[in-house]
Amino acid sequence: MTAPASPGARVLVVDDEADIVALVAFHLAKAGYRVSTAANGPDALAAARQERPMLVVLDLMLPGMSGLDVLRELRGHESTRDIAVLLLTARREEQDRIEGLSIGADDYLTKPFSPQELVLRVSAILRRVTAGGITAGDVVTHGPIEIDRAAHRVRVNGQEVELTPTEYRLLLLLYERRGRLQARSHLLETVWEAAPDIQTRTVDMHVQRLRAKLGEAGELIETVRGFGYRLRVPAWRGA
């Protein structure tokens, strides 16, 4: 088993099926993560607020409160909005996955699933969240967009924009390669650390959400139809 991206990181597993919880918890613990569990939506929120895990493995179909509602609550509060979320669901309908990604999930995995793949997905997400190589105080601007790479914060026209870890990583990659086309397969491979042949709308949904959060500055992210995306170099000063 590959060493965890963040040794000893806390992962919260939320599912009402005891056998699924036991399976996921066993493999994550074996990989070196500290695991806690919850069996319903309200307990999941309470655990997330109290324990502040780095990542939540979240089932969509939960008693008391749906997984999507739990995700909305996590993203809606400052104390939990930066917690990474991997959706684990038996629902295979595309709309369910799109809704989860649009709310702020970092990734999703459908049941039945490979425990080894789940551990790899968790590791990939946490590597993105804890990516190093940033120089303290390294603030860069691109038109009205200001990226503080030390604090992992983004401002547009001086106003802070709340981004999930994956949205931040996506914007930073587009900035670092500004002016150059980034294929969807390359973004999957780099930002999500997924195999480039995976067919998914994950990239499109995250770009759509990122544009919305950036407001008018989101127009700087250009769609190159049939290929991918590019961060356009703005004509005004400050690029």
Image (cartoon, grey):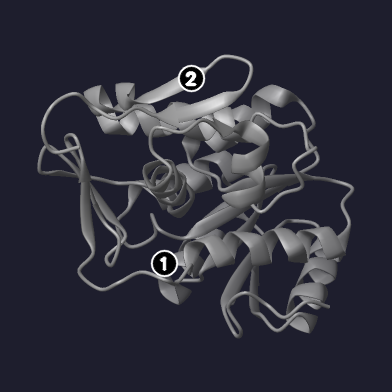
Residue 90 in picture, x, y percent from top left:
81, 40
Q: Residues within 10 Å of mark 2 (few under 14, many from 20)?
A: some
Distance from label 2 to label 1 (Cα)? 37 Å
Of residue 181 and residue 89, the one placed in the foreground of this image is: 181
Q: Residue at x 48, y 67 (%)?
A: 131
The kind of residue on which mark 1 rests is: Arg
Above or below — where is 182 with respect to 67? above
Camera-near label (2 vs 1) is 2
Residue 5 in picture, x, y percent from top left:
62, 74
Q: Is residue 66 visible?
A: no
The kind of residue on which mark 2 rests is: Thr
Above or below — where is 116 with respect to 7? above
Quarter of the image where the C terminus is located: top left
Q: Is residue 157 visible?
A: yes
Determine whether, in the image, residue 72 is placed left or right of residue 232: right
Q: Residues within 10 Å of mark 1 (few under 14, many from 20)?
A: some
Residue 34 in picture, x, y percent from top left:
63, 82
- Quarter residue 55 falls in: bottom right
Above or below — where is 133 with respect to 102? below
Q: Determine the secondary structure under disc 2.
A: strand
Determine whether, in the image, residue 78 is placed left or right of residue 95: left
Quarter of the image where the N terminus is located: bottom right
Of residue 179 and residue 68, the one placed in the foreground of this image is: 179
Above or below — where is 135 with respect to 112? below
Q: Residue at x 63, y 16 (%)?
A: 226
Q: Determine the secondary structure under disc 1.
A: helix
Residue 107 in picture, x, y percent from top left:
63, 47
- Residue under label 1: 49
Which disc number belongs to residue 223?
2
Mark closer to the chain start, 2 or 1: 1
